[in-house]
Image (cartoon, grey):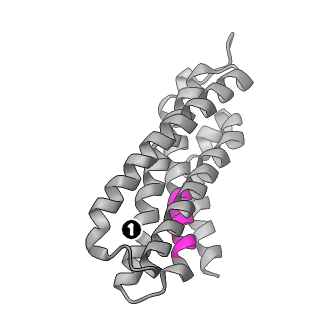
Amino acid sequence: MVNLGTAFLAASVISLFEATIAKLAVLAVFQSIVAGQGGNAGTQTLAMMVRGLALGEIEFKDAWRAMAREAGIGLIHGMAVGFFVAIGAWLWRGIPVLGLVIGLAMIGNMIAAGIAGTLVPLTLKAFKLDPALASAVIVTTVTDCVGFGLFLGLATLFLPYLQYPGN
């Protein structure tokens, strides 16, 4: 039921951009790529954090260092994946600015994934809650909301330039 509630939260972020999606329906095709990649990256990060907590290799005092490291990895990962997704989107749909929008959104969401994947399990542990139990739902919600918000927000900002060639 918690997951259902968080799904409605992510849907509410998308609903903020209904007018943008109505003007360029192809955005609906690509929004799940940004959110999905962020969710996978965040889940991998949190799995490593939960493992580190279980083995006593990481504690809450290590949070800032771990968060900075994972945000940096998210930046690098986001730039690499974002580059290929941007090229793919551009080649597939022929809209160069669409590639830019999805690439930038991917970078931002991968950074958010690294931060959320680090802080969520550490925070749950600090509150004496089992980080293995609820972390995935929270991290996925963060990456869905951030991914949808970044992608559709950037698309709204660049909407005048997101036209098919010749239009």
| Chief SS of the magenta region | helix
122 w.r.t. 71: above or below: below
Residue 109 within the magenta-colored segment of the rendering? no
Q: Which residue is mark 1?
A: 119
Q: Callout 1, which amino acid?
A: Leu
| Region in magenta | 135-144
Q: Position of residue 20 (x, y in %)?
A: 59, 38
Q: Position of residue 43 (x, y in %)?
A: 56, 63
Q: Which residue occupies 72% across, 41% down? A: 29
| Quadrant of the drawing holding the C terminus | top right
User: Quick one: 89 or 131, which is closer to the camera?
Assistant: 131
Q: Which residue occupies 66% across, 38% down? A: 27
User: Quick one: 106 or 158, which is closer to the camera?
Assistant: 106
| Residue farthest to the top, as pictured | 166
53 w.r.t. 70: above or below: below
- Is 162 left or right of 77, judged from the image as shown? right
Q: Quadrant of residue 6?
A: bottom right
Q: Position of residue 124 (x, y in %)?
A: 41, 80
At mark 1, the secondary structure is: helix
Residue 138 within the magenta-colored segment of the rendering? yes
Q: Quadrant of residue 25?
A: top right
- Can see residue 151? yes
- Crowd around label 1: few <14 · some 14–19 · many ≥20 (10 Å): many
| Quadrant of the drawing holding the N terminus | bottom right
Q: Position of residue 157 (x, y in %)?
A: 47, 33
- Can see residue 153? no
| Residue farthest to the bottom, as pictured | 128
